[in-house]
Amino acid sequence: MNRRSFLMSSIASSTALFGQSSADTIGTGMIGTGNRGAYLLKTVLGLPVARVVAVCDIKPDRLDKAATAAAEHKPKTYTDYRRLLEDKDVEAVYIATPCDLHVEMAIAALQAGKHVYCEKPVGITPESIGRLLEVARNSNKVFVPGQQMRSIERIRQTIEKIQKEGVLGKVIMVKAQRHAADDLDHEGSSADWFFNAKRSGDVIVEMAVHNLDLCNWVIGSRPARAGGFGGALLWKDDPPGRTNMDGYTLSYDYENDVKMSFTQVFFHPNGLPSNGQFVHVYGTEGAVDLNRATFYKRARKAEPVVLVPEIKESNEAHMAAFFEAIRTGKQPPADMKIGAIAALTAIMGREAIYQKRLFTWNEMGVNV
Ligand SMILES: NC(=O)c1ccc[n+]([C@@H]2O[C@H](COP(=O)([O-])OP(=O)(O)OC[C@H]3O[C@@H](n4cnc5c(N)ncnc54)[C@H](O)[C@@H]3O)[C@@H](O)[C@H]2O)c1
């Protein structure tokens, strides 16, 4: 039986169960109820398909807050995620803990027979991502990484125009960035782990994984090698003990020969032009500003063309797609493979910077 038919048969049996018990909601457990976890919880509570049956956090104040937010669903509270995974009422889990815990928790959840929505990055080392991939491949459960940009409809349609309609001709190069005016809050909710690269995977893996995934998506390939430079350039030892970078520049050479240039900084003054985040896609016929869905033809006096008009996007789309995949077997917008390739792209860039040399995809030794 292949993975899909296995999935479909498990859905069929759970649908039968729903029929018998007349419970038409999916029992959901939330692991990690900090900043992101609280947001996910709020979103899940707004989805009629879900019933929040359990919440878990090691910090009592956050656990209490989550239990209060979900009071209508009367969730059980846990401080040990392994106890939550033993709970038979939990069919699906959301994992929103610090990045170094994702792999261990996601593997345990899949092995306990739960569907998994795991925040990005799916992991912060190649070896651990390899282990998770293996477990996910041998599981009949849905796995969705928190790469929610994959659920932005306007971006999806713009990429379709580039890849299926060929508006750009052949894609040859991408220039992308993630620039912020200031450092992340030194006293914020995640300050106890975020600035420690051993826990976060460093800013490229923890944050830029979103932007790099967009690049992979529009390029339609994955990088073969990376080279770059960076470090803690401005916020040196600030906060004390900091091991995260605050600025870097990277070049990627993709397997399909597309070249990509990426920068991330935490010191781009707001008034300075070209701030924020963007993905500019260059092709033989011109360039597309991906986030604005706008095409600039490579001809004198050509007016910019909006490829896809603005769409009212739903903030819930990615979370809703997770439940839809569980209930109907529909392929989610992002799966284990997409999450793994995104994280590995970021790890590859990080290692090129740390090791001060070109770093190749194959060196990571992961069978994706
Ligand atoms: N998809 C997105 O756009 C997005 C946005 C923000 C954060 N994130 C991701 O979400 C995750 C959490 O980030 P955050 O900003 O919410 O951090 P946070 O520190 O605010 O929250 C993490 C929570 O996990 C809890 N926790 C730690 N160890 C635990 C354990 N063993 N068992 C149970 N709970 C435990 C902490 O007490 C804390 O409440 C990170 O992976 C981050 O990268 C994703």
Image: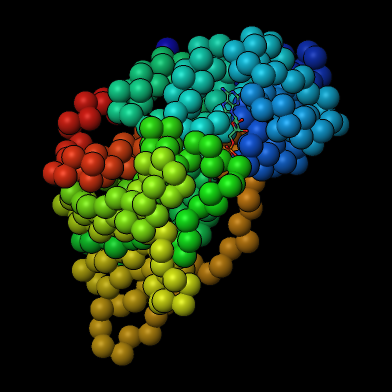
Report x, y in % for residue 265.
Answer: 37, 59
Residue drawn at x 84%, y 31% is 71
Q: Is residue 154 above or below residue 317?
A: below
Asked if residue 159 shows in the view, the reply is no
Please state if 91 lies on the left or on the right of 104 as rendered.
right
Q: Is residue 297 above or below residue 67?
A: below
Is residue 316 something one can see in this rendering?
yes
Write the residue at 30% across / 23% down: 127
Out of 162 and 88, give the one closest to the viewer: 88
- Ligand 1, by image quadrant, is top right
On screen, 269 above or below 191? below
Image quadrant in which the N terminus is located: top left
- Is residue 117 found left or right of 48 in the rendered image? left
Image-based side of 340 in relation to 321, left or right: left
Name above or below for residue 317 compared with residue 284: above
Q: Residue at x 82, y 33 (%)?
A: 68
Q: Residue furthest bottom?
A: 301
Residue 256 in percent (x, y) is at: 19, 48
Q: How is the image coloured?
A: rainbow
Q: Nearer the viewer, residue 44 or 266?
A: 266
Q: Residue furthest right?
A: 72
Residue 26, image quadrant: top right
What x and y, as percent, mark residue 42? 72, 41
Q: Quadrant of the C terminus?
A: top left
Q: Which quadrant would residue 248 be assigned to in this image?
A: bottom left
Residue 220 x %, y %: 30, 48
**Residue found at x 21% / y 61%:** 172
Work out whether residue 350 or residue 160 is closer to the camera in this orientation and state it: 350
189 displayed left or right of 254:
right
Total marks drawn?
A: 0
Closer to the camera, 21 or 126? 126
